[in-house]
Image: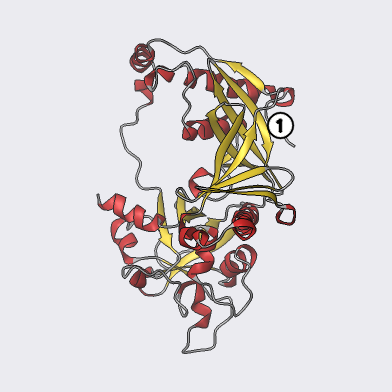
Amino acid sequence: MRKFIDEKNLKSNNNYTNYLKAICSLSRLFSESNIPYLHYRIAENIFCKAFNAENLSRDDLAYDARIGEIGIGLKTFIDKGTNQEKITELNMFSNQLRKLSGKKLAVTLSELRNQRIEFANRTYGIKSAVYHCVARKKHQLNIFESDYDLIDIANIKKIKTQGAGISFEDGKNEYSFNFSKTTLFKKFYTPQNATLISIEILDDPLQLILHLFNQQIKRFIKEKIAGVNFVILPLYSLRESKMGHKIVPEKSGLNQWNAGGRPRDKSEVYIPIPKIIHNKYPQFFPRRETSFNLYVPTGEKLSAKLCQENSKALMTNPNNALADWLLRRLLKLKEGELLTYDRLKLLGIDSVRITKIDKQNYKINFTKIDSYENFIEERNE
């Protein structure tokens, strides 16, 4: 298992430990406790900066970061020796899961978890994975790694039904599920050889921040605020979603190949761009029929452009490149097989984020369910 705190990468490790010491020294901003405060988003940003890792946390898939072909789950928690931590939320399956119990429930939870990991592996080209943990104790941090394995369904055992849920093991790890939170947890044990970092918590961090602001930070404040650098696009029909029922249209969008009117290639698809996106952000995309580069999460480059009336379709050239990547490789759909919303729901996604690098280059990543609605609602407010 890959370790990130070792002598082989001393420069990055020094940066990492110094970043952690610096941010945890400000704990009095948030708490009077002698246990260092470390928000999980800050921990993710520190790790990615120190190790030059790609931050995947906004994608809401299985991993928080990636270094090459290594997927990384990042965890920070108060160290109790044995720590039960959330590894996936399954809110969309709450009603379905409440109907199950015992072995059937444990297997279903494991299948949902494994499917999401495997989808993330295909999306990012992950070959191996690890959990990187920052466990917080009084005036110190314990850094250690834990395996990030698929649940061994064939070896599920020691199933215990509890009032609020269920617990089980697979011979390697211990899991539990809570019905009220619809969340699957995994136990993390702090090892004896964890790397210890001593933390000095400042009594008056505000005074230090004020000093830094007056002496240094002002020169970094830009006069102009950057424009919008990303948009969220739905993979489903907005017409039906307004009536409270999300579907992927059977004859348009990612099922465009199934439309009538003329013979069509089985890989003719597009990602729909709602009119409101063009109205709110008219400068985000290039003009219709203008080619640009679209990078998928593995770094592969597709040639893309906007097509159809009102530039309502994001397509690739050749058109089947989008279908080959999204429908065949990631979603594992065969030619002639319709994409359904249930398939997206199973993986916990229903939208994509398009990030603008510059006028010629864009990136595409998946986002969790309801991301498009939240994106539009936040901008309206």
Judged left or right of residue 378, residue 91 is right
* Looking at the image, residue 320 lies above or below residue 91: below
Give residue 218's position: percent from left, percent from top: 34, 21
The single residue placed furthest to the left in the displayed view is: 381
Other-residue count near label 1 (Cα within 10 Å), few / some / many at <14 / 14–19 / ≥20: few
* Looking at the image, residue 300 lies above or below residue 35: below
Regarding residue 2, the answer to whether it shows in the image is: yes
Regarding residue 289, the answer to whether it shows in the image is: no
- Picture residue at 57% right of the left edge, 31% below the top: 47
Give residue 134's position: percent from left, percent from top: 58, 28
Q: How many dots with numbers?
A: 1
What amino acid is at disc 1? Lys
* Looking at the image, residue 149 lies above or below residue 187: below
> Quadrant of residue 11 in the image?
top right
Asked whether 28 or 275 is in front, the reply is 28
Give residue 244's position: percent from left, percent from top: 34, 68
Q: Quadrant of the N terminus?
A: top right
- Picture residue at 74% right of the left edge, 57% below the top: 154
Asked whether 76 or 291 is in front, the reply is 76
> Quadrant of residue 322 in the image?
bottom right
Asked whether 312 or 107 is in front, the reply is 107
* Looking at the image, residue 360 lies above or below residue 2: below
Judged left or right of residue 337, residue 70 is right
Judged left or right of residue 221, residue 130 is right
- Picture residue at 60% right of the left edge, 53% below the top: 113
Give residue 190's position: percent from left, percent from top: 65, 28
Colouring method of the image? secondary structure
Dot 1 falls on a residue whose secondary structure is loop
Asked whether 225 or 376 is in front, the reply is 376
Q: Which residue is mark 1?
A: 3
